[in-house]
Amino acid sequence: MSGRRPYVRPMRGWWRRDPFFVRYMIREATAVLVVAYAVALLVGLVRLAQGEAAYDAWLAAQRTPLALIFYVVLLAGFLYHSFTWFEIMPKTMPMIVVRGKSLGPRVITGAGLGAAVAASLLLLLLARDFAR
Amino acid sequence: MPDERTIEIEVLRYRPEQDAVPFFQSYRVPFTEDMSILQALQYIKDHLDGTLSFRWSCRMAICGSCGQMIDGVPKLGCKTFLRDYFPGKVRVEPLEHFPIERDLVVGMDDFIAKLQRIKPWIVPREPRTLAEGEHLQTPAQLEQFLQFSSCINCMLCYAACPQYGLDPDFIGPGVLALLHRYNADSRDGARAERMELVNAEEGVWSCTAVGYCSEVCPKGVDPANAVNQNKTASALDYFLRFVLPKGATR
């Protein structure tokens, strides 16, 4: 007869066991903020389709303190999400071999973050031109 | 002058014949600067409590037997030193996400079964006689799988993977990294068979890119990369079968 009686430990509260898991859960949770911003933009688009008065009312609503707080929270979530996204990017990609050596994770993360900053700046410049 | 410093070690004990649940037992062992956690456990077994069970063999991070949770982090006992915890105490527990057989010994049955399923060896593309000579490989072809071949089956990455803890059907980081090691080898011809395991729900798609597996690997393997590269491979494998007459991998 086997004397084996394996003990299986419970998984409850697993994500609080290690700071790495806490950061992972925050990363995943910020995806909700990304969706929230997409919905907010979509609402703006719907209001635009409803005519000038509806769009102006929506624009006015964007300038209330509550809306500003909402967007600051979204921006913080976005920044964290973008950073962690590019941080994990080297792990999701096939090996890039340049002159016989594979590209290091820092180069890939740096290139991703650089591209995100450049795209954001370009968008801000375009928005400024359109606002004139 | 002899060193008379000691350090407290808390070990999670579980003796299936008498304990309903595991419990922590505390020991005081002599402390020296060069002493590993494994040596401390050996001191306990030799001098304080012969009933303590743990696995070990090589003492130099080659065999992969002494994986443990050390202060909650998956590490090799032989590669972790008391000096990094002194004068505080150290907590040693069996590897997370595996059933405890006794004390620090976990059940490896599931891991071994999964390892066998992936055919962890090179299946030659075509039969080759000795007279035909060796298989040639360029440095670039070697680079494709070299780091993944460093895996020593220590299972630390499984203890770091909450998805494996939540769903033990998940093939898991280490075995998927080894699967990739053979699939990415230019000499190998069994990719099509292994892709069936990759494509399954319990294959790469159970991974949510936590990435802790790659952090804890004591041999510098990047299992998260192997798994996530194969998400792309799996997606391609799925779509290409509509385009190519024989599918992507055949």
Image (spheres, rainbow, N blue to C red):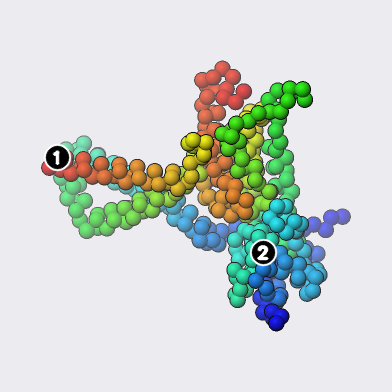
Q: Report the residue at 52% width, 50% height from top.
A: B210
Q: Position of residue A84 (x, y in %)?
A: 43, 50
| B190 up-or-down from B83: above or below | above
Residue at the left extreme of this rendering: A132
In depth, the one of B83 and B132 nearer the eye is B132
Q: Position of residue B80 (x, y in %)?
A: 64, 63
The quarter holding residue B27 reads bottom right
The mark lying in front, picked from 1 and 2, is: 2
Q: Which residue is disc 1 drawn over?
A: A52
Quadrant of the snapshot with the C terminus of chain B:
top right
Tell me which amino acid carries mark 2: Glu
**Image coordinates for residue B224, horizontal then vertical, percent:** 55, 45
Residue B198 can be seen in this image:
no
Q: Residue drawn 67% across and 73% down? A: B32
Q: Is residue B232 above or below residue B208?
A: above
- Horizontal placement of A100 versus B146: left or right? left
Q: Is residue A75 above or below residue A52?
A: below
Marked residue chain, label 2: B
Q: Residue at x 53, y 41 (%)?
A: B228
| Label 1 Cα neighbours within 10 Å, binned few <14 / some 14-19 / many ≥20 | few
Looking at the image, residue B16 sits to the left or right of residue B181; the answer is right
Q: Position of residue A82 (x, y in %)?
A: 38, 48
Image quadrant where one finds the N terminus of chain B: bottom right
Task: Give the chain of mark 1.
Answer: A
Residue pointed to by mark 2: B93
Q: Nearer the viewer, residue B191 or A52?
A: B191
Residue B134, by quadrant, is top right
Q: Mark 1: which amino acid?
A: Glu
**With B86 as the anchor, is A79 left or right in this view?**
left
Disc 1 to disc 2: CB gap under 8 Å: no
Q: Nearer the viewer, residue A7 or B177?
A: B177
Q: Nearer the viewer, residue A58 or B29?
A: B29
